Image: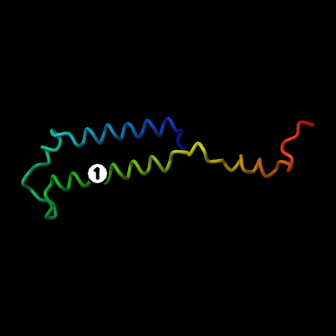
Amino acid sequence: MQSPSRAREFLVALFLLGALLFTPPLLLIFNKATRILGVPTLYLYLFVVWAALIALIALAVERAPDPRAETDADMAAKESEPAGGPSDA
């Protein structure tokens, strides 16, 4: 699992990558009259980059730990405590 700050940094990096990949200079490279499997190259580029960014964002969000979630160790410690709570005696 990644720490929350690493996940946040990864999401910011993905945003910047997406902004770079959708800038007009890169789009002009793929704005040709050629087709790949019958699909214009610009449309194919846009769809592939869009889908890849969504997949990477989903991966980053799924790997990020939920700070509110209890770990297995926390749950086991609560179950082993007496009903009255932890005692100092």
Residue drawn 45% across the image and 46% down it: 60
Q: Position of residue 24 (x, y in %)?
A: 16, 40
- Residue 16 horizontal side relative to residue 43, left or right: right
Q: How is the image coloured?
A: rainbow
Quarter-of-image position of residue 12 = top left
Q: Amino acid at mark 1?
A: Trp
Where is the C terminus found, in terms of image quarters?
top right
Label 1: few (<14), some (14–19) or many (≥20) C-alpha neighbours in 10 Å: some
Q: Position of residue 55 (x, y in %)?
A: 37, 53
Q: Secondary structure at mark 1?
A: helix
- Residue 73 horizontal side relative to residue 64, left or right: right
Where is the N terminus found, in terms of image quarters?
top right
Quarter-of-image position of residue 22 = top left
- Residue 31 horizontal side relative to residue 11, left or right: left
Q: Position of residue 67 (x, y in %)?
A: 58, 42
Question: Please, which residue is most extreme toward the right here?
Answer: 89
How many numbered circles are shown?
1
Q: Position of residue 68 (x, y in %)?
A: 60, 45
- Residue 76 horizontal side relative to residue 66, left or right: right
Q: Which residue is mark 1?
A: 50
Residue drawn 20% across the image and 39% down it: 23
Residue drawn 9% across the image and 56% down it: 34
Question: Please, which residue is most extreme toward the front here?
Answer: 84
Question: Please, which residue is most extreme toward the left here?
Answer: 33
